[in-house]
Image (cartoon, rainbow, N blue to C red):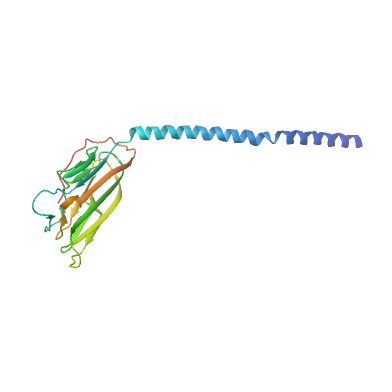
Amino acid sequence: MELIKVLLLLSGLCSLSTAQTQDPLIPTINVLKEILALKSEILQLKDEVKTLREGHPKIAFTAALDTAGINAHIGPFSTDTTLVFKHVETNIGEGFNPETGVFTAPVNGVYFFAFNCFAGARKAMSSALYKNEQHIVSVWDQPTTGDNEDNNFNAATLLLEPGDRVYIRLWKNSHISKLDKHSTFSGFLIYPLKSETSTPTLQHPPPAN
């Protein structure tokens, strides 16, 4: 009986010794597996980033109100009026139409738009950024006699589909200055999004006044 106990004890010690010898290797192998998996994910991400960069359409524009003519201001009008920014500084991708003042999205994606409005302070100055017929953001300043001019700025990030229109409307009974390119409209594509439908041919519809 005692001999059997000794043999069982020795067998247990051998098994424990073997397990202790193998235990340090198991974590190492697991870490190596995780490293290989991460390396594979990194390589896949690099390929996706490369594909995105190479396929990223270039779309950006900046335009100002035309300074031609005797009158230094546009407005006031009895109805809301789409502003036509004819003086184009940049129009990469030809998404902006200087004849109508309307930007038409050529691809599905996330876009950023900004507009600056400058005017004399003795009359109201108010305008807004529109997506199709939806009012997005606006600027406004009431008439004052304490200063000579007003300057307002606003911006928005928009999700657009091909054919969506973005433009600036001057609200009724207000005015805006066209001197020295103070009043501007800009936008650019931040990044495109995959679309289930094909991209239609870019067209510039007339603005809705």
- Residue at the image point whose x is 67% and y is 33% from the top: 25
Is 205 or 50 nearer to us in this picture? 50
* Count of marks overlaid on the render: 0
What is the residue that sits farthest to the right in this orientation?
A: 2
Is 140 or 179 nearer to us in this picture? 179
- Compared across the picture, whether 4 is left or right of 189 comes to right
Q: Position of residue 207 (x, y in %)?
A: 16, 47
Q: Position of residue 170 (x, y in %)?
A: 17, 55
Question: Is residue 45 visible in the rendered structure shown here?
Answer: yes
Question: Is residue 82 visible in the rendered structure shown here?
Answer: no
176 over 104 or under it: above or below: below
Q: Position of residue 43 (x, y in %)?
A: 47, 32
104 over 176 or under it: above or below: above
Is 187 or 182 nearer to us in this picture? 182
Quarter of the view holding residue 105? top left
Q: Position of residue 116 (x, y in %)?
A: 23, 53
Is 98 or 41 nearer to us in this picture? 98
